Structures are given as structure tokens and as C-alpha cells.
Amino acid sequence: MHPLAEKEKKRGWKYITVYYDIETTQHTPVEGKPDTYEHIPNLLVCQAVCEECAHIPHNDFFCTLCQTRQHIFHSLDDPNLNVMGQFFDYLQSFGPKTKILLTAHNSRSFDGVFVTQEAVKRKLKCEVTLQGAKILCMEIGIWKFIDSLMFLPMPLSAMPKSFGLTELKKGYWPFMANEPEYYTYEGPLPDKHFYCVSTMKQKAVAEFNAWHDEQTANGFVFNFRRELIDYCISDVTILRQACHAFRSLFEQTAGFDPMFNCMTLSSACMAAFRRNFLKPDTIGIVPPGGYHGRGKQSHIALGWLDYEFHKLGTVISTIYTDREISVLGRRVDGYIELPLPDGSLERRIYQFHGCYWHHCPTHFPANEDSGENRFEKTQQLTSLFRRSGYTVIEKWECEFKSDLASDPDTKAYFEAHPTTRTPPLGLRDALAGGRTSALKWYYKADLAKGEKIKMVDVVSEYPNANLRGEYPYGHPTLYLEGDPDMPPPDTWNGVIKCTVLPPRDLYLPVLPYKAKGKLMFPLCRTCVEEENTEMCHHNDPQERQLTDTWCAPELLLALREKGYTLVEVHEVYQYPHTSKYNPDTREDGLLSAYVRRFMALKIQASMAARVRH
């Protein structure tokens, strides 16, 4: 991984940020779906800023570079007007040499949907970056749409307090009243149920009720048109000023604009690390498919190759024993060179054909309408190998499954070797995170003894671990089970896939294990997989053993101090170097300087908040 090379701005171009918010009606029924209504935009407010004027707070400001700051597009006078169309026309008015960054809060789940609909309607070419089914970023020519929520994970209502915007406060709006019959309404405040009170948190409900009761008691006159536009303007103003404060603070600290260069806060933090703290040639980038290129090798294929090992009595080179096996520039599943009686070598290739991927003729007959005949390509490759003097041993997936069910020798081998291969180590499997836990569900304080129940807020250990912890770097050496050169456990510094036997009486287990889609810290695998909440009665060690992937520090702690027993080692990633903060010499470790700079900001913010309170 190399230090960050940030994006350069083109000479002679204008760079503008447009903050926007959309309000919608919800009265248009969706055809064929009873009680389902479509959101239709009826108001969009946007505010444009550039580097020259972003610090100026006023909404009515005019800039010679980005022109009039605030624009309001609505269909309150004519419901047939296309609000998104008006917005797109405005964006196109900036001209060709204007790079526009557009952001709305939670755009990937709401505002961005309407942007996408209008872009599709206009047949504009869109380049999207997805997060699941949601659009994280969308580029349409010189326009780039991002979501401010991915940088500021908080509601708009929390932003004024977070960024010290004392003159701004998010108000309330009766969302369920946003439909044509209320467009000309002027009178008392709408009833509370129009404000979607059921979606508010308890504290917010209390604040809303107090506000609504006070406004009603004071005889406040609610003008729908004015209040809708003012509410939307307020949201955009809060977003603009909060984002400006965030971008300015980040740029002062890290030296670059996070929203211009990145899509998310996490990517901005990584960019800050790479730009300011990463030393060259330290963090290795894992090759596609892993260090063994195992991503495309199926577990059933490895099982068949295991059986071929057994029949041959010698080791066949596979991606499990070597890096990547290639013959004539093509990947193969297995390869071995066998000496023949005449002194020559038999060059033997093993190929396992998945029925779906290679279009097994039995289950996936050739489709004349298909532009790709995978079976024919498989046959052509086999023919090429054989013409070039190689022996090719092939096995189709369906044939092997049939052998597993009916062939006595195959059945006998796998019954005797039920777990001949443990799935390969995946580096991401070692990233488990943690869990909170109620160690005692009920405790009654003894007041006579002066006992009190208090809450203690514990500062996260992550910064401390990142500051003082030892981190490996470089590219690892891989050791597989049975490798005589595998380093002893006391010297491990990377990631290990192994089987351990937990102790029976550890109050706070230390090794995480994923079961039933949840992260657990069990002392018995069978109990956690069966969700047993009673006492454990499993005496067979194999029932209690855990097989997983762990980082060296947590695994060595478990083995040295917590009573875990190492049963079997499946794979070890051992790194050539480690880095650790030295308190005597003040020499930084891999993440020390990064943590120190940003932790100082966090502490300053926390202290400032305490002073305000």
C-alpha cells in the first residue's frame, strides 16, 4: 500500500458543492399494491457554495463564481410540474467546466432515488458505486452525488449542537399533511399525528409535545406553504453549515477535503492515514483471491484432489500446496510430474469440472441460443493439454457426488477421513469485533452496607490497542498444516487458523466464535451451536473444540494465560516484520501517530462538551 496521492483539481475549472433536500407527497397510490403510496417530490431546496464563499453563512448570498446561492423548486402551484427536472435544468446551467459535488443527508435511501429516476428518464449515463442495493455514490458526467450521512452519522437535528451552530435548530414538520388539499391551508397547528410522533424517540416526543402545546397555546397561525419551504430551507442550511465545519476541521487536521476525495468517513480516515502517516512498503495488499488464489477453488474439488492424493500415494501440487498452478498459461486444479520406467516424465494434469460453471452435458445441455458454450471451451482446453503431451485426469462434479454415494472405495475413504481439508484461512475471518454483555442480570444493593449501583463509562480500548499494540506488516509467509518449517507458537505474529479446546471454568472467555449468525465467546462449540442455556454436559473434547481464525495476540493470550489448549494448527500467516510504539524512545508504531493526532481532537471535543454542560 502506498501513501495517498490525492485528486488534483483541473486548472481553469470551477468546483462547486450543492447541498439539497427534497420533500415529497405520499398520497399517490401504487398500482396493484393496496395501501401503498408513492413518494412524489413537490419541493426541492438547494444551496450552492464554492471555495471562495463556503465560509459565508447567509442563504441570500450572491457569489461571482457560483452565482445565486439558494434555489427553490416546487410544484405547489402546479402539481404537474417536475421538481427534479427543474433541479437538473439548474445543474446544467453551470456549463461544461464546472465540477459539481452534490450531497443530501441519507441520499442513498431517499433523495438519491429521485435523482436516479430523473437521470434514467433523461437517459443519462450513470456510474454508480453500490453498498448492497443502495447507491453510495453516483457520477453523471461532471456531477457527483454522495451521501453526507456516510460522513456525519447523525440526524440533522443533532448537527447544530455537534458543530456549535448556535443560531440554527431543526424544526418540526407535519409530513403526513404534505398533499395538495393542504397547500392553501392557513390556521391552527395540524394535529400531532401528522408529525409522525410514533417514529420519534422518547426524549424527542417529550420535546415535540412541549413545543406543540406551547405553539397551540400561543395561537400560532400555521401557513402550509410558508412552513414547508422554511422547514426545507432550514434543513439545507443546517446541512451546509455542518458539512462546511466538518470539511474545514478535517482539512486543517488531515490536509485534504474528505468529501471531495472520498465517499465515506471510513475511507476518509484511511486516506488521512495513508496521506500523513503511512510509511512506504509497510502494509501489504492481499492479492485478489488471497495469497493462494483460493477464491475460485471449491471445497468439493479439494475433496476430490485429496482422494487422488490418497490413490496416488504422493502429493499433487494444487493451490492448497503452492501459489498458482498454471500450464500453458492456463490455471489447472492439480499438477504432478511422475517418473516413468524409460526415464522420462509423465506430466499429469488434474481438472475438476463444476457442473454449473463448465456446463455438464448431462445436467446443462448446450443451448443454441447462448452466445457462450462453456462445455465446448472446457473440451477445447482439455484437447490442447493432451495435444501438448500432458495426461489429463478429469472429474465432473456430478460423477464425484455419485461416487460419494455409491462407490465403496470412495465412501470408505471419506468415512475414514471426514474432514480431510479444513477450508482455507480467510483474513477477514479474524476480524470479529466484540460484544457487550450483562454479566449480572439482577443485583440488589445492600444499603445497610453502603452499597450503591453506579454506571461507569469505559473509554474504548481500540485507541489504546492501536497506539501501543504490536502490528505485523509486509507480506506473510504461509505455513500449512504438517509443514515442518512452521514456526513455534510463541513466535507467531500474524493470523492463525487452528482448533483449540477451551477450559471449562473461565468466567470471561477470550476467543470469539461465530455461530447462528452471531458473535459468541463460548467454552463449548456444541452448546453454542445448539443454543443450550443450561449446564454443559459435553465431555467429548471434539464436541467442545473450536475451529476458527484468530489474530496472534488474542490466541497466545488464550493459550498462555487462560487455559485454552492448542489441538491442531491448520494454517499460519507469519509476517516478516512487526511495529510497536516504544515509550522510551518515543518511536512510533504503525498507527501510533495517527491515533495520537485524532485522539487529541476527540478529548478536546469531549472536554468542550463538559464545559458547555
Image (cartoon, rainbow, N blue to C red):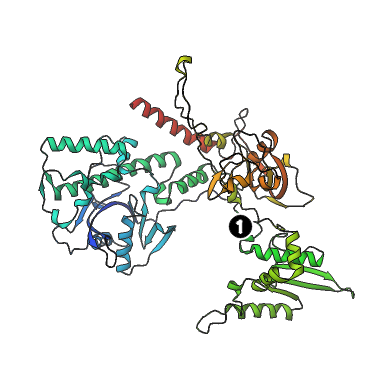
Q: Quadrant of the C terminus?
A: top left
335 lies left or right of 398: right
Residue at image point 25% right, 36% down: 207
Q: Quadrant of residue 216?
A: top left
Q: Quick check: can you spot residue 53?
A: no
SS for callout 1: loop
Foreground of the two, 283 or 286: 286
Residue farthest along the right direction in this orientation: 342
In the displayed structure, 604 sits above or below 46; it is above
Q: Residue at x 76, y 64 (%)?
A: 412
Between 353 and 83, the residue placed more toward the observer is: 353
Tell me how many marks there are: 1
Given the image, on which type of amino acid does mark 1 rest? Pro
Question: At which x and y percent is residue 71?
Answer: 21, 53
Q: Which residue is mark 1?
A: 287
Q: Is residue 286 above or below residue 333?
A: above
Q: Nearer the viewer, residue 445 or 215?
A: 445
Badge 1: residue crowd in 10 Å (few <14, some 14–19, many ≥20) = few
